[in-house]
């Protein structure tokens, strides 16, 4: 691959692929494995021909043994390799929790800094077309809770590439939360390798009336919500944390000091969530300032239903986010924005 | 000893020294534990010295081991620094992990002991992954992973064995079968404890060592490891029958609990492998080994007593690399 410094439009999936290729070219210790990484679909194209380009030893399929395969990745990392372990659905990480929480997150501290586990876990969140209760979960808060493991959730092709490269080069375990509804998103991506620094939030839209912090695919919906709100004269500042652990609380606090209203839209359940953490961090920083209003949004407090009408109700969308923002700013409920289901959700079809 | 050739007698001396050193350290821990200077759980290896010493005698310094929370024996057998180990038990800054690990998490990259875990069976896949990396780089490293009979009931052993066999990885799976998971006997947990047959079902050559026999362990492990290095076999499995003399955790005996009897233990204690091998050495050789070990251990405990605790700043260091 030659680097001409060109910035051109890529999809989120192609940005992840390019990041992986460039790091595999740079460092022989990088390898990719997981169920289906070398199959004809190549993990939505993100690993499509890596086994042809780099050999089967550096991009290989595995038995259905998520627990042991996570341990294998950790063992390889202890030997100095830089494994990238891919999961087609984040829900399967629940089979890996012992290795991720009891080992990957502990090995540096527990042994007094003598060991490092440079491990990347790619966790793909499913949505739409009937994914149901066990193919749609976003478990980022589970990992944010634990010291010793980093969590990033890039939403743009630019950040997908930069976060993936940063994660591969990081000497610690990093969970990269990807979202299936983001893979076809297109955006400008530099052709040369670069990293996106963890712990730096992005302010996507400027506004003085309301701060909306959104996570993963909800960032896309929040930006759409900001357009709805602009129609009624409300200017929202939409912030994408990009990195959830470490979390850039400062950028959010600075915005809320200006807007005095914080709406956090999580891509998971609200209870004990990333949204709760963000609200708590901002509230603590305000030192009892009574004039600031808060609201959290997220999944309905039920397992995700499969049938489409109920699935639509399960997730926040640009209209419900806009309504919540309107209520936070005006204290009124007399506005229903017009709009329809987002294209990437409406157009998505299975069978997978 | 006159009937033995030089190599054999050297091996016996080495095995004896390794086992006696572990035994003496553990008994020293028993002596001082009541003082509460070691403010954390200890899982002693008294009676179980042979598996670690036997297998490690067959490994090269460049080979890798992973172990468990009952890890004193393995740490010492693999060449770990005794002073740093005892300091670690005392929670001192001079400990191998600055006191952050303690007895249950002994590991030392400088001797390629790459991890131990308080969660049963957890380090088994790490050995497989390490072996995958070494094979990928074209090295002839062997990775040995130690676990107890309880680990056979964890799914990750089976997932790991399957993957190691699939990729022909040079992993020596070492099961120290002491017949108990804490207080639960094997017969309450496993209908057919035929561990070798289970592993052979994955295509993994397997051998069983009876009665805690250290020499047979060293020789069998040596044969298996030799075949691995030559690429003639992938992983191999070694079950070693052994017996824990003390309580699961702590310094005492536990016959009074009633889950096992002193009578059951009697043959193991009477057939003490440390003594059995020691008896085969020339008396002056044995005395010399004993004396050196005892001096070394006394020094280690004295240094640990005198060492400083970690500074408050250590609380927040090492979370990330």
Image (cartoon, coloured by chain):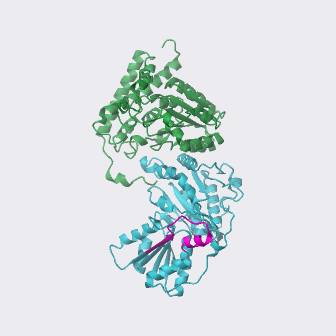
Give the residue displayed 54% in from the left and 44% down from the top.
B126
Residue B26 makes an appearance in the image: yes
Where residue A190 sits, quadrant-wise, is bottom right
> Is residue B53 within the magenta segment?
no
Q: Is B294 drawn above or below residue A228 in the view shown? A: above
Q: Is A76 drawn above or below residue B274 in the view shown? A: below
As drawn, the residue found furthest toward the left would be: B35
> Is residue A309 within the magenta segment?
yes
In this view, the residue in front, A27 or A81, is A81
Number of dots carrying numbers: 0
Query: Where residue B50 sits: x, y (%)?
Result: 47, 28
Taking B112 as reference, is B207 left or right? right
Query: Where residue A192 sits: x, y (%)?
Result: 62, 65
Taking B32 as reference, is A116 left or right? right
Residue A188 makes an appearance in the image: no
Q: Is B260 drawn above or below residue A182 in the view shown? A: above
Query: Where residue B101 sits: x, y (%)?
Result: 40, 45
In this view, the residue in front, B197 or A84, is B197
The tint of chain B in the picture is green
Query: Where residue A327 sits: x, y (%)?
Result: 46, 82
> Which span of residues is magenta-colored?
A295-316
The tint of chain A in the picture is cyan
Taking A88 as reference, is B265 left or right? left
């Amino acid at each position: 691959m030659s680097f001409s410094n060109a910035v051109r439009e890529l999809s989120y999936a192609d940005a992840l692929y390019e990041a992986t290729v460039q790091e595999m070219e740079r460092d022989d210790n990088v390898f990719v494995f997981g169920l289906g990484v070398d199959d004809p679909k190549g993990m939505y194209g993100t690993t499509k021909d890596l086994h042809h380009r780099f050999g089967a030893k550096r991009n290989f399929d595995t038995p259905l043994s998520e627990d042991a395969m996570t341990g294998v990745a950790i063992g390889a990392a202890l030997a100095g390799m830089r494994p990238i372990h891919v999961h087609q659905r984040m829900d399967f990480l629940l089979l890996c929790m012992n290795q991720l929480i009891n080992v990957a997150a502990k090995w540096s501290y527990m042994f007094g800094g003598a060991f490092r586990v440079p491990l990347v876990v790619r966790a793909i969140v499913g949505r739409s077309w009937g994914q149901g209760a066990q193919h749609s979960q976003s478990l980022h808060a589970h990992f944010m809770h634990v010291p010793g493991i980093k969590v990033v959730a890039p939403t743009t092709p630019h950040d997908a590439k930069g976060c993936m490269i940063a994660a591969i080069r990081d000497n610690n375990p990093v969970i990269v939360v990807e979202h299936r509804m983001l893979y076809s998103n297109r955006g400008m991506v530099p052709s040369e390798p670069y990293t996106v620094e963890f712990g730096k939030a992005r302010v996507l839209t400027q506004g003085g009336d309301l701060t909306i912090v959104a996570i993963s695919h909800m960032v896309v919906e929040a930006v759409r919500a900001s357009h709805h709100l602009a129609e009624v004269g409300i200017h929202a500042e939409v912030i994408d944390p990009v990195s959830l652990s470490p979390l850039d609380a400062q950028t959010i606090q600075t915005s809320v000091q200006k807007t005095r209203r914080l709406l956090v839209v999580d891509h998971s359940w609200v209870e004990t969530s990333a949204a709760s953490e963000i609200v708590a961090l901002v509230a603590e920083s305000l030192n009892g300032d009574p004039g600031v209003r808060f609201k959290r949004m997220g999944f309905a407090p039920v397992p995700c239903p499969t049938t489409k009408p109920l699935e639509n109700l399960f997730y926040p969308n640009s209209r419900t986010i806009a309504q919540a923002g309107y209520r936070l700013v005006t204290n009124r409920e007399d506005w229903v924005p017009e709009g329809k289901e987002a294209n990437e959700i409406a157009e998505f079809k299975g069978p997978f | 000893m006159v009937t033995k050739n030089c190599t054999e007698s050297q091996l016996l001396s080495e095995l004896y020294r390794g086992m006696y050193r572990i035994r003496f350290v553990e008994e020293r821990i028993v002596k001082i534990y009541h003082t509460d200077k070691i403010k954390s759980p200890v899982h002693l290896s008294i009676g179980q010295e042979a598996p670690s010493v036997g297998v490690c005698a067959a490994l090269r310094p460049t080979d890798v081991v992973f172990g468990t929370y009952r890890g004193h024996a393995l740490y010492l057998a693999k060449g770990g620094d005794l002073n740093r180990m005892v300091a670690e038990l005392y929670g001192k800054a001079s400990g191998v992990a600055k006191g952050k690990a303690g007895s249950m998490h002994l590991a030392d990259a400088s001797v390629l002991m790459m991890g131990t875990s308080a969660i049963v069976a957890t380090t088994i896949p790490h050995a497989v992954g390490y072996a995958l990396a070494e094979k990928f780089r074209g090295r002839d490293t062997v990775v040995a992973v130690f676990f107890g009979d309880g680990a056979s009931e964890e799914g990750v052993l089976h997932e790991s064995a399957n993957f190691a066999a699939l990729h022909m990885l040079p992993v020596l799976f070492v099961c120290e079968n002491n017949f108990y998971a804490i207080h639960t006997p094997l017969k309450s947990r496993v209908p057919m404890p035929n561990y070798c047959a289970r592993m052979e079902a994955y295509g993994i050559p397997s051998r069983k060592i009876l009665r805690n026999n250290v020499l047979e362990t060293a020789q069998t492990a040596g044969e298996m490891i030799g075949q691995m290095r030559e690429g003639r076999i992938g992983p191999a499995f070694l079950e070693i029958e052994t017996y824990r003399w003390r309580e699961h955790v702590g310094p005492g005996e536990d016959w009074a609990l009633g889950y096992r009897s002193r009578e059951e233990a009697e043959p193991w204690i009477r057939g003490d492998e440390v003594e059995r091998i020691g008896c085969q050495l020339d008396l002056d050789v044995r005395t010399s080994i004993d004396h050196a070990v005892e001096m070394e251990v006394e020094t280690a405990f004295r240094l640990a007593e005198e060492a400083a605790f970690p500074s408050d700043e250590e609380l927040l260091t090492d979370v990330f690399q």
